[in-house]
Structures are given as C-alpha cells and as structure tokens.
Amino acid sequence: MVGPRVLNYLSDSKTKAARIQMESLKAAIDLYYLDNGSYPPATTGLNALVKKPDGTSHWNGPYLKGTVVPNDPWGQTYSYIYPGQHGEPYDLISFGSDGREGGTDSAADVVSWQR
C-alpha cells in the first residue's frame, strides 16, 4: 500500500520540478529575445542559451548557468519548437517519464502553454 503512494509522490515531484525548470528556461529565452530581437532559431534551439549562434551580433549570454542546457527530471532533453503552435511564440515540452509525446499520469507531457 505504501509503495504506490511513494511512486505517485516521486512522479508528482518530478512533474513539479519540470514545471519549475521550464519557467527558468522561459526566462532565459525571454532574455535572449530582449538582447537579439528574436527568439532562438529552431536550428540552434535551446543551445543558443549557452553558446552564441553564428550570425548573432547582440548575444549577451550565456543565459543559463553552466555550459549545457539541463535535461528534464527524467534525463531527457526538452523539446523547443519555434514558432510555437499553441498561441505562444515558442513551445517547450518535456515528454515525461516515457520520453514520448502523449501519455497519461506519470508519463504525461509537461508543456509550456499549460499551467
């Protein structure tokens, strides 16, 4: 009886951690936008937050601590889609514990356009 509750708690904690980490990524993307007048291109994606992309003249980064973009709490890379497809300038997605689009419960996606 205790095992399932502990697993649910851990899953909820990872989902909350992904949302917090996503907010940090969004803040870094917005700083990039303020410096460059555009969002990171899809070709360089989130790596533009830690390494100056070619052809960028006003880059004032790195916009994240460290030299790499952090993985989500499940160890997967965040998906960055620009332009966004859900009413935002860009979309960020963590595909959850299963690492695939979709899913439910502990495997559900964490997305930037929903709270």
Image (cartoon, helix red, strand yellow):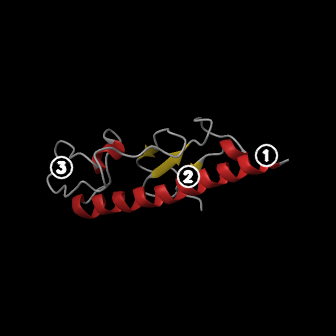
Q: Nearer the viewer, mark 3 or mark 2?
A: 2
Q: Of the residues shown, which amino acid type is indicated by label 3?
A: Thr
| In the foreground, 111 or 7 | 7
Location of residue 38 by image quarter: bottom left
The residue drawn where x is 27% and y is 64% is 34
Image x and y of residue 29, in percent: 35, 57
Secondary element at tag 1: helix
Q: Alpha-carbon distance for marks 1 and 2?
A: 25 Å
- Give SS at disc 2: strand
Q: Residue at x 57, y 35 (%)?
A: 99
Residue 13 horizontal/vertical position (percent): 62, 54
Residue on which disc 3 sits? 56
Disc 3 versus disc 1: nearer the observer? 1
Q: Is residue 3 above or below residue 34?
A: above
**Viewer-side residue, 16 vs 61:** 16
Instruction: In this rendered view, identify the residue nearer to me: 83 or 112.
Output: 112
Q: Are marks 1 and 2 in contact (CB under 8 Å)?
A: no
Q: Which residue is the site of mark 2?
A: 111
Residue 15 lies, in percent from the top left, at 60, 52
Q: Are marks 3 and 2 in contact (CB under 8 Å)?
A: no
Numbered mark located on residue 100 in the image: none
Instruction: Name the N-terminal-most of marks 3 and 2.
Output: 3
Return the residue found at the far right: 1
Closer mark to the observer between disc 1 and disc 2: 1
- Is residue 73 toward the left or the right of residue 97 in the image? left
The three-letter amino acid code for the residue at tag 1 is: Pro
**Residue highlighted by disc 1:** 4
